[in-house]
Image (tube, coloured by chain):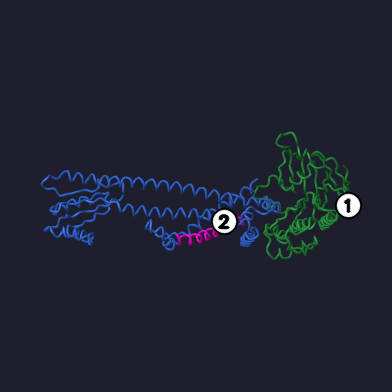
Amino acid sequence: MIYFDNVSKLYNDGRSAALQEVTFQVAPKEFVSIVGHSGAGKTTLLKMIIAEDNPSHGQVFFESLDVHKIPKTKLPHYRRKIGTIFQDFKLLSHKTAYENVAFAMEANGRDDKEIVENVPQALALVDLDDKAWNFPNELSGGEKQRVAIARAIVNQPDIIIADEPTGNLDPIATYEVVQILRKINDLGTTVIMTTHNKGVIDEIERRVITMDDGRIVRDDATGKYVL
Amino acid sequence: MITALRRIVKAGFVGFWRNSYVALASIFVLTVALFVIGSTMFLDQLLATSLNTLQTKVDINVYFVPDAPEEEVERIRNAVAALPEVSVVQFTSAEEALQQYRERNQGNEISLQALEELDDNPLGSNIAILAKETSQYESIARFLEEQQGLESAQTQVIDEINYAKNKDSIDTLTSIINAVEQASLTIMAVLLIAAVLITFNTVRLAIYTSREEIAIMRLVGASNVFIRGPFMLQGIMYGLISGTLAMLLFYPLLVWIGPRTEAFFELNLFDYYIVHFGEIFGLLVGIGVVLGLISSMIAVARYLRT
């Protein structure tokens, strides 16, 4: 479903590279963790998938679609197929939890009836139905990340991309977030997640891609955190 | 489509309300800008009116000798009226001149007695000439002097042309009027540009605080129209509110200043404000809306690029 074909990303000076000849695929319904030190190229890799960053060489495919050949006007449509979760949550601070989730559906052009039905369901899935009307600054880190997850899944995307989703969370919140991501994956959504957290990797027991210096150095079917 | 529009409108209003601090700053600056623009409009009106009054006060008077033949006076009068530069020629007959003299000197016994001593009317008829532009008096005066020059000593008709006497003051007035007109135009242009730039900048700063939000909206897959819409609506709202506020600000100011401008410039600005309320209101709000809208669009466009 996602296919990286010999992707490299060089910086402007032409020498230092964020990604070097990266080739891998992700099958539907997989749960893939990408691990590596800071600067190993994990985030760049994810940005390639949502067309936030362009490769210097190589191609990235989403199903049969070359991601970087999508015209700018069609990019919003493409991004609606992907749910994104970030370390810093990226919630709209002037909108309540409910509105943040609803916004993703509004932007998607869903009708009001669907929104009224699906938003509470999504919030219930992340166990936040009681905080629907709170603003982000009234929520804890773990709660904010759960709102972000609800927003990511509410449009029933084909794939969820999570960049260090537990990076800012305490161990309990981390555990909750990982459980939710597993649950989403069990319901049939592909998940690609980067992380630093050894405990998280060992807990999930799924495929692990290890990166170092822009290259994929290991790709284990049921990996452990090795570095 | 309608759903999207409704959502954009709602998001615009909610965003305005929740960002009220930023909105307030934008409205404040835009109000000041519109106030400056409105003030220059009033000032312009004031200058235009006072220039008009001043210009109508400038004239050339031609005094005819008391025994001037009527047809000769008539001829000069028609010749002057036929000049393209002349807008009005006002004729005062000898009897009217005498009447006016009597009225002017009503309390002055000596003057009236002196008049009684004389058998004949010592005053001749005269004409007052108004030019279309102050700069045209020179050529009218030259024409009259030529006429005077043509007359022989026996058949003198024109007694006196008072232009030469007034020439200096008319010249000074003409140059003052021109200078004031030019200076006021320059000042207005500078003030307008400053007001527009400050407004642009404030709205850009206001939207700068939302750049994160714009980035997030894009990540969630919102189309550019959907992101831009609420900001554009807010720009329009800034314009509407600021235009109304500026209009309200003028009210007490003009109530106070109106009678003073009437005494000095012969135009009561408050009356002008009331009579032209609709136009001024429409213009200020219109400028405000256009300014707010364009500023918002330019500011958001920055964050929608890449």
- Prevailing secondary structure of the magenta residues: helix
For mark 2, give the secondary structure: helix
B96 or B147: which is nearer to us? B96
Image chain in blue: B
At 75% from the left and 59% from the top, the residue drawn is: A138
Q: Residue extending furthest front?
A: B110
- The residue range painted magenta reads B230-256
Q: Quadrant of the N terminus of chain B?
A: bottom right
Q: Please name the amino acid that badge 1 sits on.
A: Glu
**Image: B104 above or below A193:** below
For mark 1, give the secondary structure: helix
Q: Which mark is residue A138?
A: none
Query: Are labels 1 and 2 assigned to the same chain?
Result: no
On what subunit does the disc labeled 2 rest? B
Chain A: drawing colour: green
**Which quadrant holds residue B52?**
bottom left
Q: Which mark is residue B28?
A: 2
At 49% from the left and 49% from the top, the residue drawn is: B191
Residue named by callout 1: A203
**Which quadrant holds residue A8?**
top right
